[in-house]
Image (cartoon, rainbow, N blue to C red):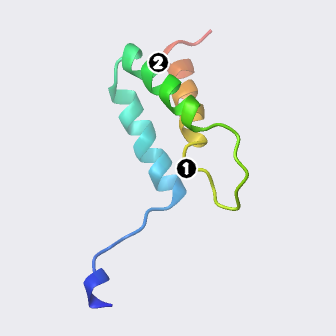
Amino acid sequence: MSHLKGIAFESSEVQLQKLRERLREISDDELIAFGKMVKGLSGPRVSHVLDPWRAQPEEARAEWRRRHPS
């Protein structure tokens, strides 16, 4: 398996942290568009595998609330 040398898998927490960093860098309009896009991708599903899209709308909402506190 030497051809797989150097491949690394990131934990869910590392992936979420990278998503948070990307969301902090985009404009409000881009954040809204992103939230709408991933909301459609994270619909209810029946699966034994974790849904990689589910956390993204939550993170987009959290970034919006950070930028625009009530």
In the displayed structure, does residue 56 sit left or right of residue 3?
A: right
**Residue 17, position as x, y percentages in the image:** 46, 46
Point 57% across, 30% down: residue: 39
The amino acid type found where label 1 is placed reads: Pro
Q: Residues within 10 Å of mark 1 (few under 14, many from 20)?
A: few
- Please name the residue that numbered disc 1 is placed on: 52
What's under tag 2, amino acid-wise? Ile
Residue in the image at 39% along x and 38% along y? 21
**Residue at 57% in and 13% down:** 69
Please identify the residue farthest to the front as the structure is shown.
Answer: 46
Q: Dot 2 surroundings within 10 Å: few (below 14), some, or many (20 or more)? A: some
Mark 2, secondary structure of its residue: helix
Residue 45 point in image, percent of width and height: 69, 46
The residue tagged with tag 1: helix, strand or loop?
A: loop
Asked whether the viewer can see residue 63, the reply is no
Q: Are marks 1 and 2 in contact (CB under 8 Å)?
A: no
Q: Is residue 67 visible?
A: yes
Report the number of numbered marks.
2
Pinpoint residue 38: horizontal percent, then vertical percent.
Answer: 52, 33
Q: Residue at x 57, y 25 (%)?
A: 61
Residue 47: give x, y in percent of width and height: 70, 56
Is 8 located above or below residue 57 in the figure?
A: below
User: Is the residue 53 above or below the residue 59 in the image?
Assistant: below
Which quarter shows the N terminus? bottom left
* Residue on which the image places disc 2: 32
Q: Which mark is residue 69?
A: none
Name the outermost residue toward the top: 70
70 vs 49: above or below:
above
User: Looking at the image, which residue sits at the far bottom?
Assistant: 1
Earlier-in-chain disc, 1 versus 2: 2
Q: Nearer the viewer, residue 4 or 16?
A: 4
